[in-house]
Image: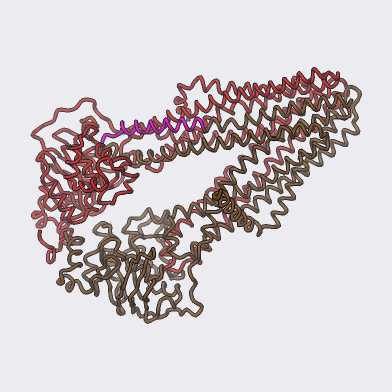
Chain colours: A red, B brown
Amino acid sequence: MRKLLVYLRGYGKESILGPLFKLLEALQELLVPLVVAAIIDIGIAQRDTGYILRMCLVLIALGAVGLASAITAQYFAAKAATGFGKGLRHALLAHIQRLSFAQLDALGTGTLITRMTSDLNQAQAGVNMTLRLLLRSPFIVFGAMAMAFTVDADSAMVFTVVIPALSVAVFVIMLLSLPLYRKVQAKLDTVLQSTRENLTGVRVIRAFGMEAGEQAAFDARNDGLMAMQKLVGRISALMNPVTSLLINAGILWLLWRGAIRVEAGLLTQGAVVALYNYMGQILVELIKLANLIITITRAVACGNRIQAVLEVAPALTSPAQPPAEDAAAPAVAFEAVNLAYHTGGDAALADITFAAMRGQTVGIIGGTGAGKTSLVSLLPRFYEATGGRVMVNGVNVKDYPLAALRAKIGVVPQQAALFSGTIAENLRLGKPDATDAELWEALALAQATEVAQGKGGLSATIEQNGRNLSGGQRQRLTIARALVRKPEILILDDSASALDYATDAALRRALGQLPQTMTVLIVSQRAASIQFADTILVLDDGRIAGMGTSEQLLETCEVYREIYTSQLAKEDAPHG
Amino acid sequence: MADTTKTSGFMRRTLQRVLLAAGRQRGLLGLSLSLASATVALTLYVPVVIGQAIDRIIGKGNVDFEGLAQKLLIITVCVLLNSALQWVLSVVNNRMTYQIVRDIRRQAFARIQRMPLKTLDAHPTGDVVSRVIADVDQFADGLLMGFTQLFTGATTILATLAFMVVLRWQIALVVLCVTPLSLFVARFFATRTFRMFREQSAARGEQTALVDEAIGLQKVVQAFGYEGRMLKRFDAVNQRLADASLRATFYSSLTFPSTRFVNAVVYAGVALGGALSAVATGGLFTVGQLATFLSYVTQYTRPFSEITGVLTEMQNAIACAARIFEWIDQPEETPDAPDATTLAHVRGEVALQDIAFSYAPPKPFIRNLSLTAAQGQRVAIVGPTGCGKTTLINLLMRFYDVDAGAILVDGHDIRTVTRGSLRASFGMVLQDTWLKSGTVRENLRMGRPHATDEALIAAAKACHAHSFIKRLPQGYDTPLEGEGASLSQGQRQLLCIARVMLLDPPMLILDEATSSIDTRTEVKVQDAFAKLMQGRTSFVVAHRLSTIRNADVIVAMRDGMIVEQGSHAQLLARNGFYAKLYNSQFAP
């Protein structure tokens, strides 16, 4: 958390003035009992109504000073805290955008979103509360004690007993109940899980007639939750009675001791009232302080989680200078490439070697988990080969500046994901300066002209997650998006899965007419999509099980034959 | 105006329901209210006695120790009693609240078990879960806890005023005059703050949506070099959030200083009135009484801000309560007729006679659909997405009832047999491979909780599930978390098949997975399906070529109607809808 405090930089004035004004406010609160004592001992004792009136005006003036300083303090605290939140959010997103795919996978989308939203909000609230209260509450507690000592050191000794006793009581109760609250949360989660499960599995539950059993299981969890809630309730319910007991014990002692001192003429009646008032002040603040400490602890935990993300050093190195390419070399070449997603884990790819010249089409086929997507992910360095070399234009991909490498490649990912915004904004993702004509051209190639026209043109709105489009429409737009870049290398990762037969065929024809300079890698589970590729790689369990044209592979490769015949069964497959 | 009456009527009805729910805890409620009154009275009485004690300490050589000791004794007794009562009060309130919450949750859950699928399908899972969990919590905090706070707060205010009037009405009048100011300030900031917080949460929502995209689609962002522009977009939203957040934080933090200032004014007024009274009455109004007054004032304004807080919270809580009751009030499934027969020794002859069905009347969905399956026949149902394949499953299992026509099993209209026995006659494997959280063994035993281990393992072996189950960390006792997320799609499917195998039903309903799984598991799944179908009347929503080819009857559906019926060869020869479908969907 400490390292995050740099994001308070630029709000130094606010961060210091805020607490200071808070102190000013606290100070006026501490002066009030003294004024009241003066009213009693001087005003009432000497029947001086003028004096009483003046002192009451002083009380109002003190209140006004308190209000003014509080407002100033709150403003500074809020300003510093929101500035802190803003700066940290920016830095966190910028950092996440520098992480490699492997790091993104390891951290997880859900986690990162939580860090960015709720954790960050909590941390911001923590900063705000700290600036506002961390100085104030202790100041009042100890200030009240100090003031009591100035009134009468002898009687004030009781403060040195009551304050520690109260602190212990408050903190012990909180320490006991906090872990129990976590248990309550865990029990609530089981109830939640039960509910969710019964909704998602309702058909199976009814098909198997498990309704009564599920109800009984839910009741048990529900009762368990209630029992835990009652237990924690009993403990935290001790807070008020115990603290008020301690405070009142202090007051009783003050009155008795004060009486002895007054009898002896060492103390006035007004002073006793002042001491009584000071005792009353510390209780409220001590409870606030305890709550504050919980808020801060929580905020620090959130802050630490954010810091942990910030401390993940971006794994990809990117040379600054573009390398010299070899025009004669294959556009894409894999040389004995290995990939393991986890060190020591199973190899996702092993010993992959192949090459494709400029303008060639490579088909990649295999079952789920065979490593098809992993293979194409190595080209834009989404993942880093753990062995061997991945070459583009005769240069190892690691020797390209990352942005320059990725600018050469158009990727159509499996998940047809679009951003909320207009169609044009989505298509310009990889090429911000593309003209409208270029966009229409790419749409035509991707068989998506009627998608854009049907929605009302390039400025039509796409909702979040492309909700207002069908799967096939989204897929065609993502293909167009990659084509707008006019990439040297086009990667289609199972990108026609949601297209109907006719559109798929038209798309294949259009891709066949791409400029001869574009190298295309097509990943698919459908033999039909890749059977006309210049080279087909058959992957099985991360290894190349066969390589060649469709005819060659039918002769030589068992796995390919298996896939081909199961999908394009010869006896009744229409030949076309 | 009409709107307000509608809202208030709605609020009244909801509150009535809440009171009804609380009514079952009548004893606790009564106890809670009496305890609350007692603690308020004691809390306010203690300062009075302290004031009297202070009056025994006048000055040098003028201390009434005997009287003081007596007062201190009274204080001690009061404080001890009050502490005990406070604790009991909290415990009683907790007990009451949590029991009501428990009962409401149980009711809501029981509804899930007895509701028609129609209602459940119409409510997104997340929505129902949030009603049962979050809304119930909010309701408990806001309404139940809020109610007790409100009661205590109001009683405190009234009792304080009463005590003050008795002590010295002139000063009480001063306090009473400033009271509207307290109310006004508390309300002013409460409404302001509410608005600012709404703006802040709107800005947060906007930002969360963008963060969802920026992080959820981060790989696309990086693939297209979109990082810089994304950060710029984010900065604009971030700035808006920071502005809204600043306003919300600042305004909300003004409430306390402002009420404190009002407090200071009241305090000064009371000090003035008290001191002047003391002077004017020549000591009849004592310094001790002044101290009592001052201590009241410090406590007096707190209930006001508490009550405003509680009132805002309560509006929210009523909305939550309304959502819960709306759920609990959903009509139940019509129960089985009292004379419903129990299906037994089912042969497996199924006939659908001219059925019609609609999800949203009057728009018809399934019309004039007739279909018969003889004992042991395999029926493959094919057709494009949305043609009514899944609906047929819903109707056969009686998840939904037909609107017209009838479905007969062994000659019985399925509406005249018990749902339990009908469903027990069908083994069902859906695409959505739902597993419950629990061990593998518990999942397999779902339909037959008392199946022996031998039978269980035999079923698993028959479905090729045994070998991978054995390799799991704890074998058959491996707990499956998150609906089996740790298993592959194919493994989950094998478990779903095995649990039906163990059930050994006379009829089957299978929905093949559309997504392809890896070739080897696929072969196992196909084989397991084939074994399962042996000798059983089966309805298969088919996506696999082999399944279709091996079916006795293929039913091709479009727009809720059967377009063609026959064997694979017959239908291909006809060269109609099926042939076209087959060529586009299953062939290259």
Magenta stretch: dominant secondary structure: helix
Which of these two is toward me, A88 or A357?
Answer: A88
Q: Is residue A146 visible?
A: no
Q: Position of residue A153 (x, y in %)?
A: 77, 21
Figure quadrant of residue A478: top left
Asked if the stretch drawn in magenta spans residue B485, the answer is no
> Where is residue B485 shown, x and y percent of the image?
38, 53
Write the residue at 64% across / 50% down.
B94
Residue A409, placed above or below residue A226:
above
Q: Is residue A28 visible?
A: yes
- A31 vs A231, nearest the viewer: A31
Picture layout, residue B301 above or below residue B505: above
Please give the range of residues in magenta: B224-247
* Residue at position x 41%, y 41% in the image: A111
Residue A165, relative to residue B62: is it above or below?
below
> Does residue B472 appear left or right of residue B157 in this picture?
left
Q: In this rendering, would B56 be left or right of B216?
A: right
x, y (%) of residue A130?
55, 29
Q: Is B579 displayed left or right of A114 in the figure?
A: left
Q: Position of residue A423 (x, y in %)?
A: 27, 41
